[in-house]
Amino acid sequence: MKQHKPNRFYWIISIFKLLMVLVIALFTFAPFLWMLIASLHPSHGSPPTPSHLMPKVWHWDNYRTVLTMDSVPFVRFFLNSLLVTFFVVICQLLLCSLAGYGFARLSFPGRDWLFVLFLASMMIPGQVTVIPLFLLVRSFGWLNTYWALIVPGISSAFGIFLMRQFFMTLPKDLDDAARIDGCNDLAIYWRVSMPLARPALATLGIFAFISTWTDFFWPLLATTTTNMRTLEVGLSLFKDSFGNTNWPLQMAASVLVLLPVIIIFLLAQRYLIQGIALTGLKG
Amino acid sequence: MKRKHSKSGLWFIFPSFVHLSIFVLFPIVFALFLSLHRWDVLKPDKPWVGLANYVVLFHDPLFWNAMGNSLYYVAFSVPLGMIVALGVALLVQQNTRGMQALRAIYYLPAVSSTVAISMVWTFIYLPDHGMIDWMLRSMGMHQWAHTDWLEDPFWAMPALIFMSIWTGLGPRMILYLAGLTGIPNALYEAAEIDGAGYWATFRHITLPLLLPTTFFILVTSSIGALQIFTPIYMMTKGGPMWKTDVVGYHIYTEAWRQFHMGMASAQSYVLFLVILVITVIQFKMVSKGLEEYSLQ
């Protein structure tokens, strides 16, 4: 904030600041670390406790146990999540960029009114729409199908807003040049604007990935059979199936669920932060 | 935009608009319709009851208990989370590589699976074996060191609030950082020439100029916190003694445990109304703050 003149307090303040950020980093990271360490403790006997932090033998076999349990098919959950997230992300990239482009670049009757409608829909609490959504999806016969998990997520007002904000920043001259060359709106969108929108698409992609991959409420309601559960709901079944006691296995399962998101986040965090700057929103 | 109207724009919006209509707009109207019926999923008969659901829930102590719990949660988790996030943002605002790495660490909880997070925090809050009790023991606070945080009627809610500060830190910090970069450096230079100290600069420049950011975080965090569900479902199931039965969870039990879809819809509309009222109050407060600031 303020440029400190080097005085005798300067070093003391700097060291104090550094200590603070490191303590907060430890506070943030400690639960993850403890999760990882606890997952390597023996899965029988009393629960791991910080006073005996490190296990005598590292039980990597906990992970094999988790991955091969019959009652909670972990690999199946993983594939379900992968399939659902893949289609949701692809559809959102397409539908949100189309609509975002329409709102940012094209002029048509009722455009501003429609945009406000999309924005306002973000304010509606999920609890209001989820009960009718459930009844609707049930009446389609979609419960316990991929349709129920994918279709309600294929477009999002947030994604449209994000893409619109990006397309607004592109210079108009490009459109005009392409139009003179005989391109129609769709061709300009696909051949001129979309290639330029790669950073924004990456941002939307990672937001959509994280929110779909970690979604819990809707998959919990839309599926009842074990085979159709996603990873997030599957993990909650783990807790129930161990009667809340087998902490090393619970933590091993948690690590397995967290790993893909954390890897994606570390690879793509640049885009996530860009997105926040672009929209002033978190996902 | 001065370009001639082209109908093709509508076709760009069309797929998303159909999606919005079916999966958001229709459910909003349908929820209102449901709330005026005794809509039990298991019973074939779903009679129109007018406002009866609203009258019943108005006199339902458990619903108002849930609303009170939600307000308690919001009143502490949002302001505390914001203060911590602002403090952290001020500490890590230098754009060095080290600070960027720290920011990524602070953000980690926000992208993580809420179920996994809830499981590890349940583990951390365990009596005796848990990390919190162990830390208290090592600090010599033995009278506290056997607390079962999530099963204690007094401590269960503070425990959830504490965890929410941890999960919410990253996104709030990033928003505050964006707000801080928007403050012109000239103001700080002027303050320094005037001999303003660190605290005065913070109080009279940083804080007022961050007001729009603060408002944005306040509104979005409050809306989010009023709907919290997953940690409650995973960690306390609304207990002990309904002390953590927040509205988001209460509506879920009404609809999917009792199968009272009509009543649950009525409750969700009351929640919507409460969110609206709180947002409007926050709006009023901030516009007053902005006026005061511009008068200075």
Image (cartoon, coloured by chain):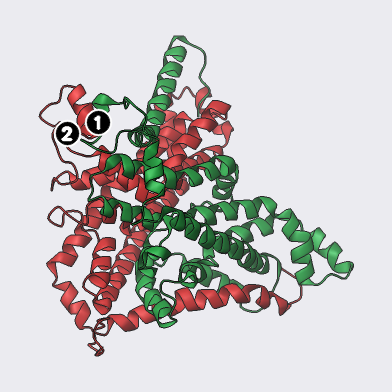
Chain colours: A green, B red
Mark 2: give few (<14), some (14-19) or many (20+) Cα within 10 Å.
some
Left or right: A190, with A21 as reference point: right
Residue at image x 27%, y 54%?
Answer: A241
Q: Does A69 appear above or below B187?
A: below
- Label 1 vs label 2, nearer the camera: 1
Position in image of residue B81 (x %, y %): 35, 42
- The answer to whether residue A272 is above or below residue B267 is above
Residue B246 percent location from the top left of the image: 24, 58
Q: Amino acid at mark 2?
A: Asp
In depth, the one of B151 and B288 nearer the eye is B151
Observer able to see residue B205: no
Name the kind of residue labelled 1 in the image. Answer: Thr
Q: Quadrant of residue A37?
A: top left
Which quadrant would the N terminus of chain B be assigned to in this image?
Answer: bottom right
Quarter where residue B109 is shown: top left
Q: Image quadrant of residue A193?
A: bottom right
Please, which chain is the residue tagged with disc 2 on?
Answer: B
Circle number at residue B128 = 2
A111 relative to A225 in the view: left or right: right
Q: Report the chain holding disc 1.
A: A
Instruction: Work out whether residue A239 or residue A89 is closer to the camera in this orientation and state it.
Output: A239
Please determine whether, in this image, residue B20 is positioned above or below residue B168. below
Is residue B131 visible in this depiction of the protein? yes
Label 1, on which residue?
A49
Q: Secondary structure at mark 1?
A: loop
| Residue placed furthest toward the left | B143
How many neighbours does mark 1 have within 10 angstroms: few (below 14), some (14-19), or many (20 or more)? many
Residue A180 at x, y = what percent?
A: 88, 68
Q: Are marks 1 and 2 in contact (CB under 8 Å)?
A: yes
> Which residue does the image show at 74% across and 78% down from the upper left?
B6
Mark 2 lies on a secondary structure that is loop
Residue visible at 36% across and 55% down in the picture: A70
